[in-house]
Image: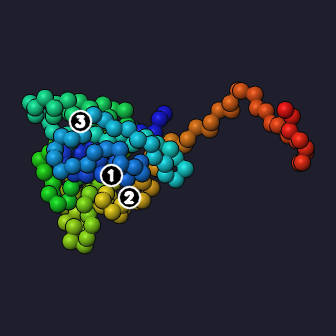
Amino acid sequence: MSNIVAIVGRPNVGKSTFFNRLIGERQSIVDNISGVTRDRQYGASYWNGKNFTVVDTGGFVPHSDDVFEAAIREQVKIAVDEASVIIFLVDVTTGITDLDEEVANLLRRSKKPVFLVVNKVDNGQRLFEANEFWSLGFENTLFLSALTGSGSGEILDAVADHLSEDEQPKEDSLPRFAIVRRPNVASLP
């Protein structure tokens, strides 16, 4: 079983920022404009001795007739289907929205581990406000500031517990050679 962690949520909650943090580079474009991420983006990550693939998705907007939002919705569903663990990212600054409720309903039907991660929790007031998200009913609810990285270690610890151990690399079947010589001996021409 491959270790795939999908990051899903409505538009502009910080999915791409968190994705970039997890893979350690700026692969996904980050912008305040909705719909910048359309296709799934894949990146490699490592935590607690486990290698895994992180998948960034576009913002999930159910029931939209917009061509791009419909295509993004399909990409999100594919990511959820192939994932072994799902991170459901929400935004504390807007509180719980109707779109968050729709995504929550979709993910509740999944038999996979879902971590509700409340993003943009970067001060005491926002930490207090983030507690409202417990009402979505996800047992695994964690707080994060994707921009600063605060809380990302706790999230990765929890996610890593649900990932399979890495398979041992198979021995290479190619022969191996070593060239050994005495010091200060002239090389052959």
Q: Secondary structure at mark 3?
A: loop
Q: Residue 45: which disc?
A: none
The amino acid on which the numbered mark 2 sits, given as a three-letter code, is Ser
User: In front of the other: label 3 or label 2?
Assistant: 3
Q: Nearer the viewer, residue 91 or 187?
A: 187
Q: Amino acid at mark 3?
A: Arg
The residue tagged 1 is: 18
Image coordinates of residue 92 in percent, x first then y, are 20, 59
Which residue in the protein does label 3 denote? 38
Residue type at mark 1 is Phe
In the figure, 98 relative to 78: above or below?
below
**Crowd band around label 3 with a 10 angstrom C-alpha radius: few (<14), some (14–19), many (20+):** many
Q: Quadrant of the C terminus?
A: top right
Task: Verify CB contact (< 8 Å) between mark 1 and mark 2.
Answer: yes
Q: Earlier in the sequence, mark 1 or mark 2?
A: 1
Please tell me whether residue 137 is drawn above or below residue 171 in the rendered image. below
Label 1 to label 2: alpha-carbon separation: 9 Å
As drawn, which residue projects farthest toward the left?
65
Rendered location of residue 62, percent (x, y) = 14, 36
